[in-house]
Amino acid sequence: MALVVVLGVGALLAALVGWGIDTSVVRFLPKEQITEAVSTGGTYAVSWSPIGGEVPLNDYFELELFVDPPPESVRVDCRMPDHGHGMNVRPRVHDLGRGRYRVDGLLLHMAGRWILRFELGEESAEFEVFLL
């Protein structure tokens, strides 16, 4: 099992280098990740992007969130399902009006697969974020 994981990570790094992506700096590149979705109940169109264009590893960051139509409430969380834990911090959501939000205080402290979850009243939208 460990050998399969090592080979898989090696293949991924080789592909990233082949695509011209600098693997010496761990980061998220939004053009390679899905950042738009429809909420679980189909009510909300959700999109987000990291302010500054990247989600860093083990450093605080902010993101912009757009939800149409605007929900009554928005909560944000991020978890590592493969490790059974979430972030060590609580992000803050700032309502900028008309379905625009700024979320700050996010910190993804480990490399791997994270699930970014936006809770929109009774519905939610989830996105995978991969940090190497």
Image: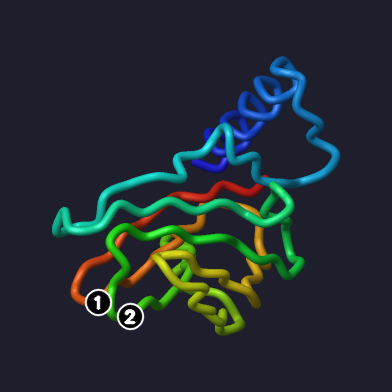
- Neighbor class of circle 2 (other Cα within 10 Å; few <14, some 14-19, many 20+) is few
Q: Residue at x 48, y 77 (%)?
A: 95
Q: Nearer the viewer, residue 112 or 93?
A: 93
Q: Nearer the viewer, residue 41 or 26?
A: 41
Which numbered circle lies on residue 73? 2
Provide residue 98's location: percent of width, then percent of height. 41, 66
Above or below: residue 102 compared with residue 131: below
| Residue at the limit of the structure toward the left, as seen here | 41
| Residue at the limit of the structure toward the front, as seen here | 98
Provide residue 45's location: percent of width, then percent of height. 30, 52
Q: Residue at x 45, y 73 (%)?
A: 76
- The kind of residue tagged 1 is Gly
- Neighbor class of circle 1 (other Cα within 10 Å; few <14, some 14-19, many 20+) is few
Above or below: residue 59 compared with residue 45: below
Give the colour scheme of this rendering: rainbow
Q: Secondary structure at mark 2?
A: loop
In the image, taking residue 54 as reference, residue 121 lies left or right, namely left
Above or below: residue 11 compared with residue 126: above
Q: Nearer the viewer, residue 39 or 58?
A: 39
Provide residue 81's location: percent of width, then percent of height. 41, 62
Provide residue 73's location: percent of width, then percent of height. 33, 80
Q: Disc 1 marks which residue?
A: 121
Q: Examine the image and state in which quarter residue 5 appears.
A: top right
- The kind of residue tagged 2 is Ser
| Residue at the limit of the structure toward the right, as seen here | 24
Label 2 close to label 1 by CB (< 8 Å) = yes
Which quarter of the figure is the C terminus placed in? Answer: top right
Q: Secondary structure at mark 1?
A: loop
In the image, taking residue 132 as reference, residue 99 lies left or right, namely left
Q: CA distance from mark 2 to mark 1?
A: 5 Å
Q: Earlier in the sequence, mark 2 or mark 1?
A: 2
